[in-house]
Image (spheres, rainbow, N blue to C red):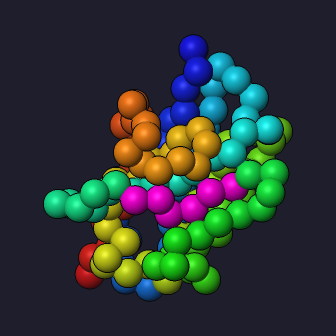
Amino acid sequence: QVQLVESGGGLVQPGGSLRLSCAASGFTLDYYAIGWFRQAPGKEREGVSCISISGTYYADSVKGRFTISRDNAKNTVYLQMNSLKPEDTAVYYCAIDCRDPNEYDYWGQGTQVIVSS
């Protein structure tokens, strides 16, 4: 069964850091583009970052603060989030490819990130 499972979320103070993990099972993600997305309360889901053989992409809102990486040996993609802001509060999801969020039919359970003092 092809599956991506997100983890690593939690409650953090503004300015803090978290590292999210996106673990793949049922397939090898080496040659796939993997995207991180997020959905804040009352807002639409948005793309945050993407990693592919072409390189990496970041939304303007996270550029310089977030870093996406992959460990093929662990079949996992990470999202290192530094200098977190309250507006980063959202449920974070990962998905294969880096499409418009509206093009996906299915999402995993995601991992909740809350940035608050």
Visible residue check, residue 104: yes
The quarter of the picture where the C terminus appears is bottom left
Left or right: where 19 falls relative to 9 = right
Quadrant in which residue 80 is drawn: bottom right
In the image, what residue occupies the spot 57% across and 79% down? 63
Q: How many numbered tags mark residues here?
A: 0
Q: Residue furthest left?
A: 42
The quarter of the picture where the N terminus appears is top right
In the image, what residue occupies the spot 70% across and 23% down? 27
Left or right: where 65 falls relative to 38 = right
Quadrant in which residue 32 is drawn: top right
In the image, what residue occupies the spot 32% across and 67% down? 89
Most common SS among magenta residues: strand
Visible residue check, residue 16: no
Q: Nearer the viewer, residue 1 or 48?
A: 48
Q: Residue furthest top?
A: 1
Q: Nearer the viewer, residue 83 or 27?
A: 27
Quadrant in which residue 78 is drawn: bottom right
Residue 75 x, y percent position in the rendering: 73, 37
Q: Which segment is the magenta one?
A: 46-51
**Rendered view: 1 above or below 33:** above
In the image, what residue occupies the spot 44% across and 85% down? 15
Residue 60 is a magenta residue: no
Residue 48 is a magenta residue: yes
Residue 61 x, y percent position in the rendering: 46, 79
Residue 33 x, y percent position in the rendering: 69, 45
Residue 38 x, y percent position in the rendering: 39, 57
Left or right: where 111 falls relative to 48 = left
